[in-house]
């Protein structure tokens, strides 16, 4: 059984978000490098809001700079603060890091 937050085919779910109509807010863990970074860039290009976490503040800063230069279907004047990327440094493998997210 697939739930909204787990199970199923991650590639299929990512494709569904990129193909879907309208802007969505997408949470990506491991957004600092690899597949997470690539998904963040692609989804931002499609006009989605990206919320992400990574263990490396330097990688988050780099990604934020790169996302600032991404062409999105939304113009700067149409982007609210809730549509801009939101990143935080978190290691999801450590419970003490997760306590502050409540």
Image (spheres, grey):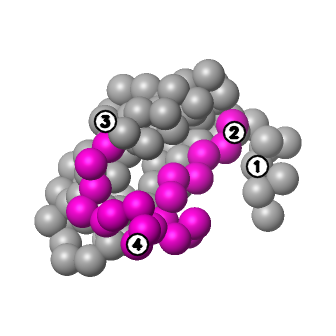
Q: Quadrant of residue 50?
A: bottom left
- Asked whether residue 25 is in view, the answer is no
**Looking at the image, is 15 positioned above or below residue 23?**
above
Q: CA distance from mark 3 to mark 4?
A: 24 Å
Check disc 2 and report the residue beneath it: 90
Check disc 4 and report the residue beneath it: 78
**Looking at the image, is 80 positioned above or below residue 53?**
below
- Label 4 Cα neighbours within 10 Å, binned few <14 / some 14-19 / many ≥20: few
**Looking at the image, is 45 positioned above or below residue 36?**
below
SS class of the residue under badge 3?
helix
**Looking at the image, is 59 positioned above or below residue 37?**
above
Q: CA distance from mark 4 to mark 1?
A: 33 Å
Residue situated in front as seen by the camera: 69 or 31:
69
Question: x, y (%) of residue 95?
Answer: 78, 44
Which numbered tag is attached to residue 38? 3
Asked if disc 2 and disc 4 are in contact, CB closer than 8 Å, the reply is no
Q: CA distance from mark 1 to mark 3?
A: 24 Å
Query: Number of callouts in the render?
Result: 4
Sequence-wise, the earlier of marks 2 and 4 is 4
Asked if disc 1 and disc 2 are in contact, CB closer than 8 Å, the reply is yes
Which numbered tag is attached to residue 98? 1
Q: Nearer the viewer, mark 2 or mark 3?
A: 3
Asked if disc 3 and disc 4 are in contact, CB closer than 8 Å, the reply is no
Question: x, y (%) of residue 82?
Answer: 55, 69
């Amino acid at each position: 059984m697939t739930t909204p937050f787990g199970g199923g085919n991650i590639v299929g779910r990512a494709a569904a978000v990129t193909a879907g109509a309208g802007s969505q807010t997408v949470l990506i863990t491991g957004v600092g490098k690899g597949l997470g970074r690539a998904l963040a860039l692609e989804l931002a290009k499609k006009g989605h809001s990206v919320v992400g976490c990574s263990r490396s503040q330097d990688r988050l800063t780099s990604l934020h700079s790169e996302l600032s230069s991404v062409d999105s279907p939304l113009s700067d004047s149409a982007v609210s603060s809730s549509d801009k990327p939101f990143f935080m440094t978190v290691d999801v493998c450590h419970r003490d890091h997760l306590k502050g997210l409540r």
